[in-house]
Amino acid sequence: MDQTRQSISHFIIPLSVLLIVGSYIVGFSVGQNSISGEIPAEVVNANTDEISQVDFTAFWKSWNLLNEKFVAVATSSVEVTPESKLWGSIQGLAASYGDPYTVFFPPVESEAFATEISGNFEGVGMEIALRDGVITVVAPLKNTPAYKAGMLAGDKIIKINDSATTGFTVEQAVKLIRGKKGTSVLLTVSREGAKETTEISVTRDVIDIPTIDTELKNNVFIIRLYNFSALSADLFRQALREFALSGTSNLLLDLRGNPGGYLEAAVDMASWFLPGGDLIVQEDFAGKRENIVHRSRGYDIFNESLNMVILVDGGSASASEILAGALKEQNKAILIGSNTFGKGSVQELVKITSDTSLKVTIARWLTPLGNSISNGGLKPDIEVKRTAEDFKAQKDPQLDRAMEYFKTGK
């Protein structure tokens, strides 16, 4: 779920919310006086030394040449306005940092992103992100159209309907996949281990985001957590109460396919297992400001008899990685499954104009031992893969391995 800080709330925005029921501010006017190559006065306070080293002649020369020479082809229906050229320039500036989570949103995209994070979703019900330059599924949410259609974490989306996704940003992919309830989208995916691509048609719907399920199975209490919403912390507390009354000391927390959510929920959940003051995660600002350290609130209600396993996979991201990383490195749980996604950065959403915004990466998450979550995600203590064939056959070797661990202790 990408981590984005927006004013007061500290929400780890999912990498890209395709649930779809879904500060580098440069003042910069476009007009006759701007086409001079001079640095506008509003920009000077951004970073005078850096800007003074840049020759803007190439930019303005390109601007003028495009104005003078560009001829739209007959099939082009895109109106090129001074504003759209400005928005495109800022998009290119953001893209030059090479970070898929640092993105400029022109007016239409800015409104769409605001709708996504508001909770009104209509669409297919999965998270996507850029991985190695390819649009990749982080996780389909349980019982959503994407989940029911057979989309899997790690699927690489090669085409959306008739559009190849080569060179796409996440936002471009979101725009094509999003749609009204009852309409469908055809996704061509490349799947690990498969020799050929697969076409999957997904019918969009209103997304009911699941949060938590509990089950007592073979003397193991299982908590399946699907996201870190505003309600998750309270629901998790209720689940732990059920666990405490279950008569077992074996706790299995299933974070597979959980793309994240609120940081505060992850901190609160970790606090049930850690003494007060224990480090959970820190935000590293690379020296641009003092790091922010998040520590346990010290609920710490479980004694040494607790036997805890956390299931993770490539769909476990952001807040899931924060919680799993903290409990693993504080020796409260072992991880079983496959490598997590590796979404370990914080974004801030900044208004640029009244109808545009910039989502910029401002920090990275570090585990208690100082490991960057973005550096390959979390590696499980016991690695077990779950293949596409396992999903189709409704087999779960990761869960089976966890149950075996509870029986044997290894």
Image (spheres, rainbow, N blue to C red):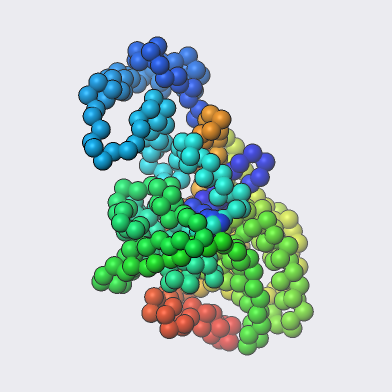
Between residues 113 and 201, which one lies in front from this camera angle? 201
Name above or below for residue 350 compared with residue 346. above
Front one among 114 and 75: 75
How far across and down, in percent of the image, does residue 223 sit? 64, 73
Q: Where does the image place residue 258, in percent across and percent down from the top left?
A: 54, 64
Q: Residue at x 53, y 63 (%)?
A: 205
Name the one closer to the observer, 159 or 309: 159
As displayed, is residue 70 above or below residue 211? above
Locate residue 40 relative to residue 57 in the image: left or right.
right
Q: Is residue 264 above or below residue 108?
A: below
| 246 versus 83 height, above or below | below
Image location (x, y in percent) of residue 73: 23, 36
Q: Tell me if residue 340 can be seen.
A: no
Q: Residue furthest front?
A: 74
The quarter of the displayed image where residue 152 is located: bottom left
Q: In percent of the image, x 31 and y 53: which residue is there? A: 163
Q: From the viewer's perspective, tell me whether residue 144 is left or right of residue 293.
A: left
Residue 127 visible in the current orientation: yes
Residue under the image location 44 percent in, 52 percent down: 174
